[in-house]
Amino acid sequence: MTDITATAPAIIGRSLWGDAWARLKANRAAMFSLYYVAAIAFISVFGPSFVPHQYTTIYADYVRMPPSLSAYPKAEMIETALSEAIRRMRVDIKEWRQEGSQVFVTVKSTKPIDDRNIRYLDRSDAFDGTSIESKSPDGLEVTMSASIKQQYFLFGTDNTGRDLLSRTLMAGRISLAIGLLAGVVAVVIGVIYGAAAGFAGGKVDEVMMRIVDVLYSLPFIFFVIMLVVFFGRNFVLMFLAVGAVLWLDMARIVRGQALSIRRQEYVQAAEAMGVGQRGILLRHVIPNLLGPVVIYMTLLVPQVIILESFLSFLGLGIQEPMTSWGVLISVGAKNIGTANWLLLFPAFFLVSTLFALNFVGDGLRDALDPRDR
Amino acid sequence: MLRYVFRRLLTAIPTLFVIVTMAFFLMRVAPGGPFNQERGLSPEIKANLEAQFGLNDPLWLQFVHYLGNLLRGNFGPSYNMPDFTVTELFAKGLPISVQLGASALILALLLGSMLGTIAALNQNKLGDYTVIALATAGSTIPTFVIAPVIQLLFGLTWKLLPIGGWGDGAFINKVGPVLTLALPQIAIVARLMRGSMIESLRSHHIRTARALGLSDWSVVVKHALRGAILPIVSFTGPAAAALLTGSVIVETIFSIPGVGRYFVDAALNRDYTLVMGTVVVIAIFTIVFNLIVDVMYAVVDPRVRYD
């Protein structure tokens, strides 16, 4: 009955968490990963407000533009954009020239040209601030000037001309939020269920764990797809549901821990000293449970992100125009032949975040593992 | 041993029954039905179709019918592909998925245990760190990223492999899918093997073998490997079941006509019989492979006995 291997005699002067934090700080890979995840989370949350493009804005003139550090429109694109806008005015170009960031274009027509026609130039994504410079007396020829609208698409644009940078950041926001949301749901259910089973013990424990076994034996993807079928494509509900599926492992871990903690000598000592159930739970069981729970949670978040991406990849998850890394990667995978940046940028963000989260999880495990002390 | 196998097969029946029951009723409480999607289906035709497939009977009666058919090995007709029975669909797709899955599994076991052994023999040296890095990468990068990257590199940039398609099972068409399926598994096997090999190399009989002057090769292959292989054996059961029943992602990206997609498509179209068929097939694979693994334990480790 005496099982002393798992007890954690606290080093004098340092709490469990202070000690764990010191160990984590010594682990360079884990700390770097922690900062990296924090940075990704930061730019995903605040980035979209600073990128000059909305993640839903469609630039019809800039469909599938490759990523570039210099501004669009490129020199050779000005003429195309210009002739396209002029064609919409149903007039002909007589001549055009570029001076710095200004273009001057003279158009002619067989009918008098309406001044309101200049709006067609403003409507193009390449120009703005159009004004009429001069007009021939008969109104058949008009010279207009417009400034070239400089726009940066650092990650390029997608199939409908939306800025990939703002979409990737927005996707990060959604993916991380979902990871956290479903992770928390899974942890809460798992901890309550597992702790209840572990504490009750005996027949109750037996029955509760058999239920977990049965749920385990159903194909996991079957469950998830059934949830999608039930909850439709409302993503918040769905991921609450996904979280509600992922609690099985958590429940097992917590139950095992609770069972073993209950048999520890310090718990017996506390009982002998007359500490109540509540006191034992708060003072001894919960703090000792927290370690594995925290570790499992950091490993659960990447799992949920993968799951979300997987569902979105199948078209069951996040729906357009909202986006997530899974949605972007699935679009990218369909366009690898012609626009590989659509795959590469979101894939890089997803994979690097997953890596970092895994390193943080491993680091936490090393830091909190009592056997290693 | 035979008695053990027989007993395990007997206990599989209630497990299978629970799975079938849960899947059946879960599927049925989901809103919608197999004939709801088709637009322009007049109510009379829809009613006729539902009557033909017995969908208007009380649910328990349908369940009894389904179980009866299942016991006779009849999975029923597919609702969304009316020309085929579920059995025919599996006869067509399963060999393809099994081929890919089995190749990936064999590749993963061979390459994974080799890498794991190399890492264990070079513990905390360059070789070890390389394998650990590869294993971390392999188990973190999701399949739906690996697959398009393989297409991009091998298919489009270097033009070594076709981008997709089954090509009647031509070898070159299998390379991409098998690699994609195998990579994460290689990572898992390598990790398991590294851990158990390190432990096995520390045991007394290995020290004895070394003391007797056996060569490194013979120590590792003849003695350490045998002790280290147990975790790999237990990994193989669920992995085989998952790999052989097809992967939605891999089959979608590489356009492989396997069974991996059946489940998702069927669940979305409420193709009840096909969903149930998939659930049953996956459950049977899982049960059988877990049994094989447990039998293998006794073969690999003589200390394990079933009486």
Image (cartoon, coloured by chain):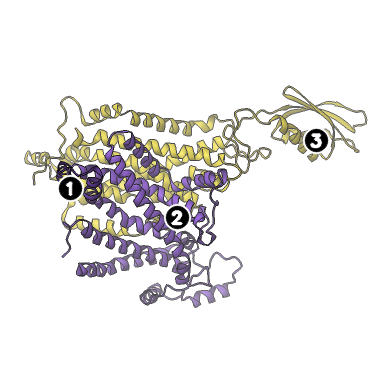
Nearest to the observer: residue B8 or residue B279 = B8
Chain drawn purple, letter? B
What is the quadrant of residue A16 in the picture? top left
Considering every residue shown, the one lying at the far right of the view is A138
Q: Residues within 10 Å of mark 1 (few under 14, many from 20)?
A: some
Residue B99 in the image, given as x and y percentages of width and height = 43, 60
Reading the chain from its start, which is encountered first: label 1 or label 3?
Answer: 3
Chain drawn yellow, letter? A
What is the quadrant of residue A209 in the picture? bottom left
Q: Is residue A181 visible?
A: no
What is the quadrant of residue A147 in the picture? top right
The residue depicted at 27 percent of the width and 57 percent of the height is: A213
Chain ID of residue with mark 3 = A
Nearest to the observer: residue B175 or residue B90 = B175
Say which residue label 2 marks: A228
Reading the chain from its start, which is encountered first: label 2 or label 1?
Answer: 2
The residue depicted at 15 percent of the width and 65 percent of the height is: B307
Residue B182 in the image, given as x and y percentages of width and height = 41, 50
Q: In the image, B192: left or right of A95?
A: left
Say which residue label 1 marks: A259
Chain ID of residue with mark 1 = A
Say which residue label 3 marks: A117
| Amino acid at circle 1 | Leu
| Amino acid at circle 3 | Asn
The answer to the question of whether label 3 and label 2 lie on touching residues, with beta carbons closer than 8 A, is no
Secondary structure of the residue carrying numbered label 1: helix
